[in-house]
Image (tube, helix red, strand yellow):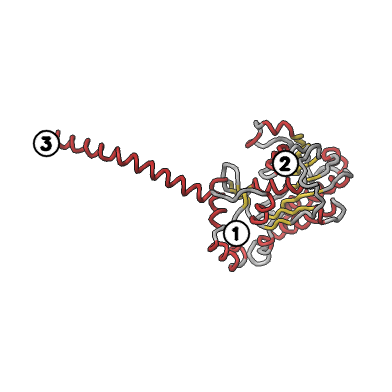
Amino acid sequence: AGISQGWSLSVTVFGGSGFCGSRVCKFLVEKGATVSSISKSGSAPKWCNNEEWTKQVDWKSADLLSSSDEALDAVVGMPEAVVSCVGAIGTDPSILLKGNGDANKAAFASAMRGGKLQRAAYVSVSSEVDACKENWLPEFFKSYFEGKIIAETAAIDSVGGDTSKVCFVKPTFIYGGDSFGINPPRVNFEYGAGVEELLFLPPFKIAADLTPGLIKVALRPPVCVDSVAAACVKAALDDSGADLPTLDGTEAINTYSGQPKSTGLTDALTWSKEKLTEFYGWAKVEVPKAIDTVQQKIEETKK
């Protein structure tokens, strides 16, 4: 027993067409699981729609908020493990509550009705972010956190109330991919990896430990989407019988997922050093040539 390689294990990913969910699908396929993705679009996202692994995912379409139980059950089927990356952000309290709470409640309930569910994983939110809801964030954000609580409760209910069979992955800020975004807020892999490595340095860790609220959160290292996805996959495939963990924050997520430490800052400094060395080598040859050319021009004008 241990971490299953996923052979023949049926895993459903709610929100599988999304930023995080699509990476979960990819890693599950690589582990040999039988993978279904359920999302509104019912298709692979643009970043990977031409990749070979996407052909091994059953991309299904369903609206978790409007589908009847019968219709949703027909799509969800009888998964043995589920991962939910479903969530919503914005300023409308109703959307935040439904998108984070009601949608996940419907998803986990359907998976439970399938009758074969053994494990569940859910991408929630860091406790340090949650702690900001009272005095640091606008009033409408409370619906976001209420929705997360509803989702976590539904995840536990889906496995018969056994918290040992549920893994909650709780990041602060997730980065990755090759682009920046505003809604949802996102930075690309290169930038995010540099910030992650920087904020893991002792002075920033000490400052984060001492400061309150959103200042603390801002000083915490962000986490790579690959690490979040790998943690979800590890939990979904864990047939060891051991209690599944709650992974609160980047360090816990990275440790559990086994992802290597970020080297974004080091890579950037190395790249800069290499480019400066290249420039120095170029300048050492070309600058004297340019000076000679100018001097020649000056001499010609004197004649």
Contact between labelled residues 1 and 3, with CB atoms less than 8 Å apart: no
Kind of residue sitting beneath label 3: Lys
Q: Judge by depth and name the residue closer to the eye, 269 or 39.
A: 269
The residue at 75%/39% (across/down) is 37
The residue at 64%/55% (across/down) is 250
Q: Which residue is mark 3?
A: 302
Give me the C-alpha separation between circle 3 and circle 2.
75 Å
Judge left or right: residue 114 versus residue 181.
Answer: right
Q: From where the camera sits, is residue 192 visible?
A: no
**Mark 2 burial class by Cα count in 10 Å: few <14, some 14-19, many 20+:** many
The residue at 85%/51% (across/down) is 159
Percent position of residue 26, x then y: 69, 39
Q: Which residue is mark 1?
A: 220
Q: Which residue is mark 2?
A: 16
Q: From where the camera sits, is residue 70 visible?
A: yes
Kind of residue sitting beneath label 2: Gly
Q: In which image quadrant can residue 292 be found?
A: top left
- In the rendering, which numbered label is found on residue 76? none
Mark nearer the N terminus (3 vs 1)? 1
Q: Is residue 234 above or below residue 214?
A: above
Kind of residue sitting beneath label 1: Arg
Q: Which numbered mark, 1 or 2, is in the foreground of this view?
A: 1
